């Protein structure tokens, strides 16, 4: 190899050059020599000449690279190159050998089972025999029966060995005498001395017999708890000691037996115990694994989202990604808490657990930490709202450029195609009729000549085919109306209705599924709560209870709110697409914050990915119906909406303030808006608004109410797992930071929601949201204080 | 043909088969090292294996909520332990895997002990060897021979290890062995016997060219294990000693506590994987790069932790950072110690003379150089002894052999009796009389010219000019030129094509220099895959121990010359 020696060696640097044979690196003095050498020595070798040549090239490269390196050129670059090169020799690096199948193996299981079965049969018969006898011995009332009678019964159960046959104790070998008397095992009839005698207490006996009875009746035995087992054992031990002082033949509450029978019985007892008993560690561990599975499932989803968001794609919604991030992080915290709980299991108990148990607990904790570390590492951060807008804008421009190019090309071809097909299709009598729930967009377009162009760029982004269709058809309707083809309009509207029905159904199904899952999760979380409430939490409790709880509940609502929000946005979108005026109207406020267009684009997508709550469905249909039939635009005028709001808000305590302020003012002054409303009032507002005359408002509030209901249904402790103070001590700073970041993100989100809500004229929501915002800001401030000290 | 992967697959399969839940891995002494070579603790933890227990450990607690995976060698003691375990089971379910063939009667006695029906699986998984690198395996046996014949227990263990290797790679090979070595022949026969007996197991899909097992004897090349090494893996083993991928650094002056013992495993250490076959100089510069890379990262994180985003980035990068700092400190320590030893023991100069002794035939210059170094106080007695050993091996029958003079020099230098005796022991072990092939003088014209040219032109690197004898053997084998006379086939059939899958096994131990040779052969010859094995992996120290353990005691310095002559007369 043409390697030379850089320091630390001070040897003369030696680079081989000249006529080197590429195969053996022998230096030949001239080209001819080299040629003849190659022919002589290597002609017979059927080596891969190409590989050798490549080899040579690699070497040359390497040499060059080395030179570069010495000159202090980019080092990381060469490192990567080197790694790559190590795999590209003529042969194969053993690390790169193609994967092989699993090596040979041989199972002895069937053989093993055969032998075992024979043995087990024997063993089971023995045990069962003993238990049947035990049952007979305990089936009568021992305390109230004379000893002679007991003896008679005992002898009838199993024939006793003749005294004369056994002069010595078979276990210890002592000679029997008057002082060392013979005792019979009541279970097998054999003889032993007093020292070797064992006793079976009645509780143990009944436990054994009842367990076997239950097994026969194929019952699960829930009755005997581990405590009672301990009791029975202790009883048997004490009875041994007490019996030594008593020479009385009569055993009221115990049965004499030999060591072997007792051993068998004890083994049996142990088996019974084990069946019933699951230690705490197993329960906790199972939960831990469940959480890990959840992470395995959710984290990739999140990473996909974050990746897409970070390049400015609008496939996913930033808020949703945020939610998911929070969710995943919650699970991480749960894992952390659970594993910590496992770590400390039994540490405060006396006696201390076996060192191996402790080792096991430590290992579980360690692996959980590893898991969190490894997975958390992959959990990339999300762009902030502003950054995201920037990214989105950039991407949009890029896409637009591309789209423009494409469209120009396709438009040409499309036009030609249409012309060709027009008369062809029109001959077939049926225009897309109402029976088909999914009328092909292409056919509609071709036969009727309606182009869904007005919303073309937006549709590109919509993933759900149903929504796409709805969009298309609405645009068709518009065009048809413009062309004054009323029959077609009717037909299209019929189509539209069916589509919407279909969509609603779909959404409801999804929502049901989701709510089921949520219910499960909530239950699990609630279970965890009891376990997870920790010291830090208590520390916080000395603060005003109400405030604390509000923080929590608001925190929670925020999440819900968001779902609610998305539903609404969706609604807006539909309404807009139904009404031409809307877009015009929208254009003025859109300049301020996130362009509604962008939001609209995201929403339907997001729906397809994240099913919305069930209530969204019915509401939605009513909404659209309304729009269709009345052609009334709910967003026509901001003043209009605020008027509608008024009656609702008058019921609120702070209503005067709200009412007096025109929406615009509110918009700018939202920070002055009274944030010290508490939950109760909130609900009041909602309750009131339900009765508001506006059907539109009505929908919105029933919505909100259900949100609130959910809130109260879910105890706020449910969120205590998010408690940032619960984190491992050594990680505390890091976790805190993340938490802070999350808060900031949330605040951003809420600001956006407020804007949105205002835009669509939902004053009550604006209220709630503003309050949320305040709360969040307060928590953030608190956190900052805490992290400072 | 990847032996690490083969064993790893077995272990993974065991763990998978036992399903979810907390698990304990019950092993014996040998299987513990087998598993530890292919799985790291954190890796296996993620598969829910939380405890590692020895079957012979008395301090095990009953934990019925654990599943037990038993991976054991099928020895008498292990079966007995297992029987005791099954009589009073400590865990809920047992999955039993033996690393080799187990007798039917043992299965029966186990079955009879399992009264509580806790055994769910009993299988043979043939991971019965230590997988060192993908192409290198070892059996960790020291002192496998007594004199020139096998220690019987070691023979059966070696045969078991080799057959397990074949089974795990699913190869039913043709066998060739070194004719000059009796142990090689015995081993070949033993392996063949097992293959015949367990023909059902060895019934694999036939490949076009059958695989080849070549059994060699260390005594044919006693030079390689006596040389100082300059590639990373080999050097670490030579100077510090690698034991199941672990390096004991406790004797390094001023070592920090957590670096007392470090693990060098190519499986999880990217830097090591990329550098283990590079020479010391290259590693020096690579480690510098690694450090720089590390330092570039470091201050960045400490500079500005003002914004939340910065802090978050820090937290997210922290584990990676920590891991990297672990790697950096490990390799910096190891390489630092290597270079300290190299300068302290004057290894560059020593090695140069060693290489000259091993590769060139200039007696007078070699003799001069050895004498010169023996006078050097920096050269340790160990290195001095090995120089004389190399001289003795090479110029054993040279007309102007002046070994007695060198032995006197050794004595004057104060080299202990033990080492002086070893000089003659080495000659006895691997001298010309024993060697089946010529280690030093080239055999054919081509080789002669090669060597001549080498002498004329100088070599690229004085310290790594030595090529193990194995290289030539394998080269000829690959070309189909290896002489049947010297390396006969066992049995009537011979290989007509050139071999593709080759397993080389060296009785008496392989070396990391040979591992490197095989690695390079694998990389440079397309279509050929070679796996190298040995009863152990030697460095000079362990090699000399092996020689003493095998009963070559030497006869004291002064009489060695007589021995050599006497033996040559025979």
Image (cartoon, rainbow, N blue to C red):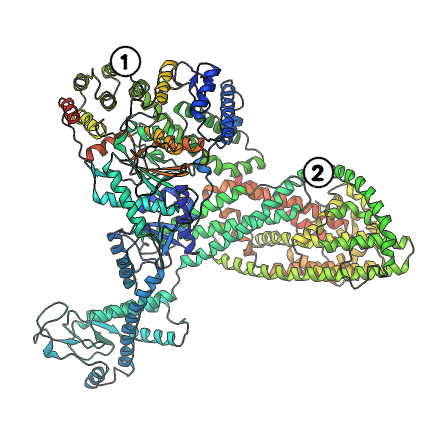
Chain designation of label 1 = B
Query: Which quadrant of the structure image shows residue B441?
Result: top left
* In this picture, residue A167 sits left or right of residue A696: left
Density class for disc 1 (Cα within 10 Å; few <14, some 14-19, many ≥20) is: some
Spot occupied by residue B411 in the image (x, y as percentages of width and height): 16, 19
* In this picture, residue A460 sits left or right of residue B271: right
Residue under the image location 49 percent in, 55 percent down = A290
* In this picture, residue A700 sits left or right of residue A55: right
Kindly tell me whether residue A563 is visible in this rendering: yes
Spot occupied by residue B305 in the image (x, y as percentages of width and height): 54, 33
* Residue nearest the observer in this picture, B390 or B62: B390
Element class at badge 2: helix
Check residue B365 in the rendering and tell me which mark sits there, or answer none. 1
Query: Which quadrant of the structure image shows residue A625?
Result: bottom right
Image quadrant holding the N terminus of chain B, namely top left
Residue closest to the far right: A484
Mark 1–mark 2 Cα distance, whole angstroms, equals 75 Å
Q: In the rendered image of this protein, does residue B445 appear above or below residue B86?
A: above
Chain designation of label 2 = A
* Residue nearest the observer in this picture, A360 or A5: A5
Element class at badge 1: helix
Check residue A395 in the rendering and tell me which mark sits there, or answer none. 2
Check residue B71 in the rendering and tell me which mark sits there, or answer none. none
């Amino acid at each position: 190899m043409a390697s030379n020696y850089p320091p630390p060696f001070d040897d003369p640097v030696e680079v081989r050059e000249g006529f080197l044979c590429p195969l053996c690196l022998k230096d030949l003095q001239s080209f001819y020599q080299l040629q003849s050498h190659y022919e002589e020595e290597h002609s017979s070798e059927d080596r891969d000449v190409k590989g050798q040549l490549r080899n040579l090239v690699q070497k040359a490269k390497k040499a060059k690279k080395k030179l570069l390196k010495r000159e202090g050129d980019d080092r990381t670059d060469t490192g990567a190159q080197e790694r790559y090169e190590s795999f590209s020799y003529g042969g194969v690096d053993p690390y790169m050998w193609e994967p092989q199948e699993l090596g040979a193996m041989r199972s002895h299981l069937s053989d093993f089972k055969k032998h075992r079965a024979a043995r087990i049969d024997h063993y089971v018969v023995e045990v069962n025999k003993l238990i049947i006898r035990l049952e007979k011995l305990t089936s009568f009332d021992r305390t109230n029966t004379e000893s002679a009678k007991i003896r008679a019964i005992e002898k009838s159960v199993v024939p006793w060995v003749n005294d004369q046959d056994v002069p010595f104790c078979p276990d210890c070998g002592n000679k029997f005498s008057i002082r060392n008397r013979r005792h019979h095992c009541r279970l097998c009839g054999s003889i032993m001395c007093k020292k070797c005698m064992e006793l079976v207490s009645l509780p143990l006996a009944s436990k054994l017999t009842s367990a076997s009875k239950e097994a026969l009746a194929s019952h699960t035995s829930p009755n005997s708890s581990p405590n009672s087992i301990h009791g029975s054992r202790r009883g048997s031990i004490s009875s041994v000691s007490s019996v030594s002082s008593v020479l009385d033949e009569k055993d009221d509450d115990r049965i004499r037996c030999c060591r072997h029978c007792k051993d068998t019985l004890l083994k049996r007892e142990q088996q019974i115990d084990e069946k019933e008993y699951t230690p705490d560690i197993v329960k906790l561990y199972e939960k831990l694994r469940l959480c890990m599975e959840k992470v395995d499932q959710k984290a990739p989803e999140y990473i996909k989202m974050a990746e897409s968001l970070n390049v400015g794609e609008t496939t996913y919604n930033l808020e949703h990604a945020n939610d998911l991030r929070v969710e995943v992080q919650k699970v991480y915290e749960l894992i952390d808490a659970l594993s910590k709980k496992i770590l400390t299991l039994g540490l405060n108990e006396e006696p201390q657990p076996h060192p191996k148990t402790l080792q096991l607990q430590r290992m579980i904790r360690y692996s959980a930490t590893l898991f969190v570390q490894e997975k958390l590492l992959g959990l990339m951060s999300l762009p902030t709202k502003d950054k995201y807008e920037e990214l989105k804008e950039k991407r949009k421009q890029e896409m637009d450029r591309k789209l423009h190019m494409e469209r120009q090309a396709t438009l040409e071809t499309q036009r030609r195609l249409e012309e060709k097909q027009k008369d062809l299709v029109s001959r077939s009598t049926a225009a897309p009729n109402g029976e088909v729930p999914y009328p092909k967009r292409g056919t509609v377009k071709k036969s009727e000549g309606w182009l869904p162009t007005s919303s073309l760029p937006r549709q590109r982004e919509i993933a759900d085919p149903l929504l796409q269709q709805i969009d298309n058809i609405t645009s068709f309707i518009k065009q048809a109306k413009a062309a004054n083809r009323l029959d077609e309009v009717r037909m299209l509207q019929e189509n539209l209705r069916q589509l919407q029905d279909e969509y609603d159904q779909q959404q409801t199904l999804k929502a049901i599924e989701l709510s089921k899952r949520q219910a499960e999760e909530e239950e699990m979380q609630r279970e965890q709560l009891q376990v997870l409430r920790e010291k830090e939490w208590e520390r916080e409790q000395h603060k005003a209870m109400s405030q604390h709880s509000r923080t929590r509940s608001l925190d929670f609502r925020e999440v819900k709110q968001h779902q609610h929000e998305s539903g609404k946005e969706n609604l807006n979108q539909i309404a807009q697409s139904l009404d031409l005026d809307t877009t015009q109207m929208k254009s003025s406020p859109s300049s301020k914050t996130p362009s509604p267009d962008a939001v609209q684009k995201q929403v339907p997508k997001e729906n397809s990915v994240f099913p919305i709550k069930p209530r969204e469905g019915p509401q939605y249909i009513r909404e659209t119906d309304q729009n269709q039939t009345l052609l009334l635009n709910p967003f026509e005028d901001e003043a209009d909406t605020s008027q509608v709001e008024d009656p609702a808000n008058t019921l609120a305590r702070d209503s005067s303030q709200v009412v007096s302020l025109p929406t615009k003012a509110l918009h700018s002054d939202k920070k002055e808006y009274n944030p010290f409303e508490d939950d109760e009032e909130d609900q009041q507002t909602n309750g009131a608004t339900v009765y508001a005359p506006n059907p539109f408002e009505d929908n919105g509030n029933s919505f909100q109410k259900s949100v609130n209901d959910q809130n109260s249904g879910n105890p706020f402790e449910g969120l205590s797992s998010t408690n940032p103070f619960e984190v491992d001590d050594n990680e505390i700073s890091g976790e805190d930071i993340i938490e802070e970041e999350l808060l900031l993100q949330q605040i951003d989100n809420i600001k956006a929601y407020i804007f949105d809500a205002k835009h669509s004229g939902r004053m009550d929501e604006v209220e709630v949201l503003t309050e949320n915002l305040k709360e969040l800001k307060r928590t953030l401030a608190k956190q900052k204080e805490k992290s400072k000290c | 043909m990847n032996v690490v992967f083969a064993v790893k697959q077995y272990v993974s399969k065991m763990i998978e088969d036992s399903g979810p839940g907390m698990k304990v891995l019950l092993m014996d002494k040998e299987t513990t090292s087998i598993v530890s070579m292919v799985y790291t603790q954190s890796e296996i933890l993620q598969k829910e294996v939380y405890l590692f227990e020895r079957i012979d450990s008395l301090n095990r607690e009953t934990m019925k909520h654990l599943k037990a995976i038993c991976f054991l060698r099928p020895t008498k003691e292990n079966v007995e332990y297992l029987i005791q375990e099954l009589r009073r089971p400590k865990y809920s379910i047992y999955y039993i895997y033996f690393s080799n063939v187990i007798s039917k009667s043992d299965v029966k006695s186990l079955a009879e002990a399992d009264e509580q029906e806790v055994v769910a699986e009993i299988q043979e998984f043939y991971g019965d060897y230590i997988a060192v690198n993908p192409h290198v395996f070892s059996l960790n046996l020291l002192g496998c021979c007594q004199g020139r014949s096998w220690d019987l227990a070691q023979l059966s263990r070696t045969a078991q290890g080799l057959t397990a290797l074949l089974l795990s790679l699913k190869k039913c090979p043709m066998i060739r062995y070194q004719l000059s070595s009796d142990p090689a022949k015995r081993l070949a026969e033993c392996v063949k016997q097992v293959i015949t007996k367990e023909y059902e197991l060895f019934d694999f899909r036939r490949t076009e060219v059958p695989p080849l097992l070549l059994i060699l004897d260390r005594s044919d090349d006693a030079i390689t294990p006596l040389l100082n090494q300059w590639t990373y893996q080999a050097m670490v083993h030579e100077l510090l000693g690698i034991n199941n991928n672990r390096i004991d650094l406790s004797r390094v002056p001023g070592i920090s506590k957590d670096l007392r013992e470090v693990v060098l495993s190519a499986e999880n250490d990217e830097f090591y994987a990329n550098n283990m076959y590079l020479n010391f100089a290259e590693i020096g510069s690579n480690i510098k790069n690694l450090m720089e890379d590390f330092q570039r990262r470091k201050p960045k994180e400490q500079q500005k932790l003002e914004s939340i985003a910065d802090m978050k980035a820090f937290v997210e990068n922290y584990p990676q950072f920590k891991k990297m700092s672990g790697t950096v400190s490990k390799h910096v320590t190891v390489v630092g110690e290597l270079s300290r030893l190299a300068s302290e023991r004057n290894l560059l100069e020593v090695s140069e003379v060693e290489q000259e002794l091993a590769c060139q035939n200039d007696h007078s210059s070699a003799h001069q150089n050895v004498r010169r170094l023996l006078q050097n106080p920096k050269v340790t007695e160990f290195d001095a002894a090995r120089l004389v050993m190399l001289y003795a091996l090479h110029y054993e029958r040279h007309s102007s052999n002046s070994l007695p003079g060198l032995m006197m020099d050794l004595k004057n230098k104060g080299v202990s009796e033990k080492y002086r005796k070893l000089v003659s022991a080495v000659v006895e072990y691997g001298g010309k009389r024993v060697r089946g092939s010529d280690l030093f003088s080239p055999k054919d014209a081509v080789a002669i010219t090669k060597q001549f040219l080498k002498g004329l032109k100088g070599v690229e690197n004085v310290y790594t000019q030595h090529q193990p004898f194995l290289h030539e053997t394998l080269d000829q084998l690959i070309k189909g030129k290896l002489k049947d006379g010297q390396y006969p086939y066992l049995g009537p059939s011979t290989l007509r094509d050139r071999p593709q899958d080759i397993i080389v096994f060296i009785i008496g131990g392989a070396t990391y220099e040979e591992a490197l040779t095989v690695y390079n052969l694998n990389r440079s010859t397309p279509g050929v895959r070679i796996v190298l094995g040995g009863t152990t992996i030697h460095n000079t120290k362990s090699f000399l121990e092996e020689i003493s353990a095998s009963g070559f005691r030497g006869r004291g310095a002064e009489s060695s010359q007589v021995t050599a002559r006497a033996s040559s007369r025979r």
